[in-house]
Image (cartoon, grey):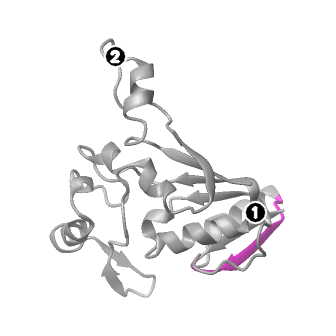
Amino acid sequence: RVSAVDVGPNRVLRRVARSTALRLDYCLADGQRLPYAPQSFDLVLLVETIEHVPSAGRLGREIMRILRPGGQCFVTTPARGRFLLRPDPHYAVRGIAGLPNPLQRFVVNRIARRRVIAADGRSWPAYDVEHLFWHVREVARLFPGLDGYEALYDSPPLGGPFLSRGWWRRTLRGFLFDHIVITKGA
């Protein structure tokens, strides 16, 4: 069984469900009160979402409520450290990831003048990120009752002859993660 939650209609998700013949329960909700029974899921995918949620702790508690014991939540969210010198993943503004969130909002909305433009021509400031996370522990703390967590990465941002893969894993993984797997305790 596959269920999906989004704050607004998600045409891409519906298109994927149609093209793959995936049976999909789809509902609109903000994640603060998920419309599912406790312990009803083995796996939750939280894809590029948690950084946009005003009350990420509430979302983490709701996910832990609906996960079965031993269930996992796979989280993708941009780590601040990965974007300190590169354009940020949301607005492509170089260097803003190291700034405090209110200053990021100011730079994106006022200096870079990024706007969202609706089909009817209305527009509003684009910045909708609530919080970028420095370390995987910041994300893990949002999920009470976890049994453990693991930071994953697609490829190390540093490497070469002076920094071994083992050093990278031990030292920087928590700061430069790509994904996080949260496991609910028994």
x 81%, y 60%: residue: 22
Viewer-proximal residue among 147 and 76: 147
x 37%, y 43%: residue: 175
Viewer-proximal residue among 174 and 125: 174
**Bounds of the magenta segment:** 21-30
Give the label on residue 88, or none. Answer: none
Q: CA distance from mark 1 to mark 2?
A: 42 Å
Viewer-proximal residue among 76 and 17: 76
Q: Residues within 10 Å of mark 2 (few under 14, many from 20)?
A: few
Horizontally, residue 152 falls left or right of residue 66, namely: left
Q: Residues within 10 Å of mark 1 (few under 14, many from 20)?
A: some
Q: Element at badge 1?
A: helix
Q: Dot 1 corresponds to which residue?
A: 17
Quarter holding the C terminus is bottom right
Horizontally, residue 22 falls left or right of residue 149, namely: right
Q: Quadrant of residue 145?
A: bottom right
Q: Is residue 149 above or below residue 120?
A: above
Q: Nearer the viewer, mark 1 or mark 2?
A: 2
Please state which amino acid type lies under the numbered disc 1.
Answer: Ala
- In the image, is residue 31 part of the stretch drawn in magenta? no
x 56%, y 61%: residue: 143
Proximity of marks 1 and 2: CB atoms separated by less than 8 Å: no
Q: Residue furthest left?
A: 111
Specify which label sits upstream in the sequence, 1 or 2. Answer: 1
Q: Element at badge 2?
A: loop
Image coordinates for residue 2, horizontal then vertical, percent: 79, 63
Please state which amino acid type lies under the numbered disc 2.
Answer: Gly
Can residue 182 be spotted in the picture?
Answer: no
Image coordinates for residue 123, horizontal then vertical, percent: 34, 83
Image coordinates for residue 178, horizontal then vertical, percent: 47, 44
Q: Dot 2 corresponds to which residue?
A: 160
